[in-house]
Image: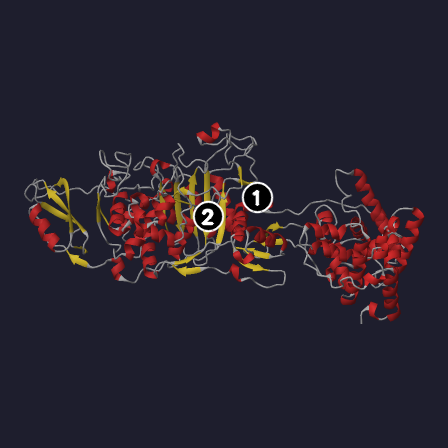
Amino acid sequence: MRRHDHNVVINAASLTICGLLAGVVVAAAFFPAVAMSGLAAKAGADTFDKLPSELTVTRSPQMSYLYASDGKTLLAMMYDENRRDIPLSDVPQVMRNATIAAEDKNFYKHNGVDVKGVVRAFVANKQAGETQQGASTLTMQYVRLAIEYSATHPRDVVAATEDTPARKLREIRYAMAVEKKLSKDEILERYLNIAFFGNGAFGVFAASQVYFGKQPKDLKPEEAAFLAGLVKFPGDYAKDNPEGMKRALDRGKYVLDQMVTTRALTREQADAAKAAQLNIRVKRAPNDCVATIKNSWGFFCDFFYRWWLSQETFGDTVYERERRLKSGGYNIITTLDVRTQDTAKRNVEKYLPTYQKGSKKPEPHALMLAAVEPGSGYVRAIATNRNFKLDDLAHPANGPATNPAKRKAGIRGTYPNTTNPLITGGGDITGYQAGSTFKVFTLVAALESGYPLAYTINAKPVYKSNYIVEYDSDSACPGTNKYCPVNANKSMTGVHTMWGAFGRSVNTFFVPLEERVGAEKAVDVAKRLGIRFLARGTKDNPNDYERSQDSWLAHGWGAFTLGVSSTIPLDLANAYATLAADGKYCEPIPVQEIVDHTGAKLDVAKPRCHQAVKTQIARAAIDAARCPVGDRSATSRCEGATAGATKGIVNKPVAGKSGTTDGSKTAALVAMTKQIAVGGIIADPDWAQTSFNFTHNEVNPAVMYTLRDAMRGKKGIQFTPPEDPKLISGDQRSIPDVTCKSVGDARAILERAGFVVEVNDTKIGSTCPDGTVAETEPSGRTIKGGVVMLRLSDGKGISPTPPPPGRGGPGGGGPGHGRLCPPICIG
């Protein structure tokens, strides 16, 4: 039985007194000037019983917490009000006693309305001639705060706090109803969780943290009394208000004296508490992504924040979703892996440090990494050489814009401080060209179209395609409107399989392959693997978005396979991760688990996956993707490696691809194991058409060592090779012997056998007559429909010396392809 139910006489007396004196005593107690006015008379006994008694209480705003994937490491807090509700059992008795002594010494004796207090206030106010005492009980204070928090319109907030007899009468009515419904301890618990303590602290949990940096259970008597005293004047204790600070400290001592009156403390205990030193710190809880526990986690936090605002689960509008996040009291376990994140940031800083005041001039180049887990889409790391801070573009801390037009207009760059989502995209960040990393989409499209890995094409030094470009432009064959790609160096000339062409990144292999497959199919593969094509008809990239949407336009997108489309490190890493997961695409997400204030887990945090590419196709693509990073394919048919140092550094089974754009305006590398994919791009986010030539000297090692460090302690898992022989070798046919035959006869024989015939005009030493066929490349067997190259004899009877294998890669070697260079810098 609750305490207030045991005394019917007291209940009846409260109702009688409140009803009969509501219009006079109550009004006089709070508003002596209107005690005998018509307003007081109208608020009398006849209307009191008609006042609503059912109090609608909306849950007060609660802080949401973001944790790392371990569920323990705190990343950030999100809130409109710094508050976290706790049960009364977590509030020490000394804090409860201090609150009662400060606000309502008769709390456990009355039934919501302290009749004696009302009469006492009436007498005191009448003698004073003005309002001196209010006689609000702790329950009435809770009612007022509850009404304020439940208000849905600003005018309701005003009505909940305005000084009118009507408001007081409503509070009395509600307070008596609340006392019938809730126990005293339940009321006290709710009050302690809803009260404002100043300095952004709502509720006793936040107050303990803000003022003393501790849990409520650890509060000492002097600390509890100080906090309890703040509720009456929460704005007093501020560093810029010395007088207010003194009042707050004095009130804390007053509360200690009142605790003696209520027998919560002895006089000796109170005096000792008064003499104790209060170590008040006033440290507000960090809020939002600009105040993550580590600044380097800010970009990941921002990715989470943008993701949350895009989820309809949390509301119909962005405003509603943000309110849910900052007031819903969620515990959110994110996908960020602290070790992977920290090593990614460490490697970024090692190879391209964030500008620090006092060092050399600010570096506008951004080295950006994203790490994604194959098979789940969990984003494990996001790192760049920037500080995540609100960037005031007029502030001299940031360097000048690299874009000449912006610089002329006085606009500063986004370095070293920015909140732009450089790695994950959004706003005006539409991405960066990733070069030959896009060749994988043509490779997958070719496999889906029936072209096996053993398919051969004679890669010429310059390839005149059928793709239409601007007449006589830089990308056109001289005097034509035909797209005319070239290789990085002449050593790439010759017949290649997909393994060799992908490993060495041969442009004049992949453009004709794209022609045969259809560029629109390569674009479709990119979409299925998660490339979002964020650029929408920008000046720098007018056709990026339009071509990706319209297949008839994409069909003529000859340069697509060479990576002229904009992308971001996150999408690039996830596209390759999809292949590592046997073709299962998973949306890149920042959450593993979301628990609401009731303890329920939300389904929105579950991975969102579907099969984007057939398993065998994905495995065949990975078999080729092992070549560029120095690993061995399951068939051991790799030839060359544009980022060959990767395998030795990671020391696990790896796959991936490097890429450099035309003019070396960006450089990129994706490297992955079965467990994690790391995508990196170095670019100028403020000016896509930068005049700077990027190399792989920063991005390659940053990606490689991040992957290595992320894999420490993890067992290497071998990639599963494709089982379908048609994807590997296709329909193999014997090549007829045409040695010493004329070119015409040899061509006729080979074409009847189902091969495509090419002629290499450079003659080689042979005993065959001059101008006849000395040999074929390849010899023996090749794929049906594959290229057979005729090598012609010089008639001198000397065997040729094969040329040394090339090392560079198109879109993958950086400026100065073919130069001698440590393996780590080769694209």
Describe residue 178's horizontal placement relative to residue 578 as left or right: right
Q: Secondary structure at mark 1?
A: helix
Crowd around label 1: few <14 · some 14–19 · many ≥20 (10 Å): some
Residue with the most extreme left position = 769
Q: How far from the left and from the top, in percent, is residue 230?
A: 78, 48
Label located before the other in sequence (2 or 1): 1
Quarter of the image that includes the N terminus: bottom right
Q: Is residue 166 left or right of residue 433?
A: right
Colour scheme in the image?
A: secondary structure
Q: What is the x, y in percent for residue 436?
A: 34, 44
Residue 201 in sight here: yes
* Residue placed under numbered mark 2 in the picture: 370
Distance between the alpha carbons at the discs numbered 2 and 1: 16 Å
Residue closest to the eye, 475 or 578 = 475
Displayed quadrant of residue 753: bottom left
Q: Give the residue displayed 71% in from the left and 52% down from the top.
A: 156
Total numbered labels placed on residues in the image: 2
In the rendered image, is residue 217 in sight? no
Counting from the top left corner in percent of width and height, residue 380 is at 49, 52
In the rendered image, residue 642, in percent from the top left (x then y), is placed at 33, 44
Q: Which mark is residue 262?
A: none
| Label 2 element class | strand
Q: Which residue is mark 1?
A: 295
Instruction: Answer left or right for 361 relative to 267.
Output: left
Observer-nearest of 88 and 107? 107
